[in-house]
Image (cartoon, rainbow, N blue to C red):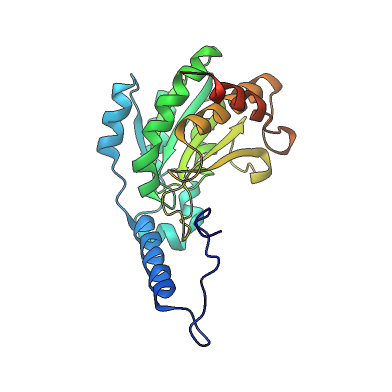
Amino acid sequence: MRALTPARVGLGRSGAGLPTEALLGFTLDHARARDAVHAAFDTENLIAALGVLGLDPVQVASRAPNRRDYLRRPDLGRMCDADSQRLLAGRARGPCDLVLVIADGLSPAAVNLHAAGVTRELLPLLAQAGIVPGHVVIASGARVALGDEIGALLKARMVAVLIGERPGLSAPDSLGAYLTYDPKVGRSDAERNCVSNIHSSGLSSAEAAFKIAWLIREALTRRTTGVALKDESGEALVSRLAKPV
């Protein structure tokens, strides 16, 4: 069982406690999770990687002035600061189908590692459906709900937020994608779809991009996300992955 999962099973015992090896492993994974939360958001390399894909992202920030306040005040991470609001409002040229937001979230390390790869896989799938992101935004100090305000300011029918998820003891670098139709301030989590667990031991970039593209296409067609939209991409994904390269 231990060979099949990174979960902590079959750890054994040493008296009334854990064996030294298991205790040291727990301590190491806990340290990795803490490091992921406090990692620097490498926006410079992210912008360069997105530029190779033909994207010209704009950078914004939440109202959290630093990482300490971001962690203690989740509400500040859900609102754009005044400069970002003005910047986005000035870029809103008219309604668009989709805004892609790439945000640091609770694991900048996950975004640094996986966001560009997921985006690279996602763009051609969206293009096949006739969907082109109207804007690409890089957001610092962000919570998921920041995408609602960004999407509303840019007059988007839909927003997709790629964001670092809360680090776990077996996955400190997990990326999530949150999809919201008709974004506006005050949307609840029940009104979003989520594709989570995107990392080297979870969903691959290709698998995640396929699910995200399927949900975006269906959301724009059905005009809804959240509990009203179920992810039924499984069979199509299996067929796609089974095709010889």
Nearest the camera: 115 or 204?
Answer: 204
Nearest the camera: 10 or 189?
Answer: 10
Residue displayed at 52% across by 33% down: 208
Looking at the picture, does residue 240 appear above or below residue 1? above
Looking at the picture, does residue 3 appear above or below residue 211? below
Looking at the picture, does residue 81 appear above or below residue 155? below
Q: Quadrant of residue 104?
A: top left
* 10 displayed left or right of 38: right
Residue displayed at 40% across by 53% down: 64
Q: Quadrant of residue 119?
A: top left
Q: Is residue 154 visible?
A: no
Image quarter in which the N terminus is found? bottom right
The spot of residue 26 in percent (x, y) is 43, 69
Image quarter in which the C terminus is found? top left
* 162 displayed left or right of 41: right
The spot of residue 226 in percent (x, y) is 68, 37
* 165 displayed left or right of 116: right
The spot of residue 114 in percent (x, y) is 39, 38
Q: Is residue 215 visible?
A: yes
Nearest the camera: 175 or 13?
Answer: 13
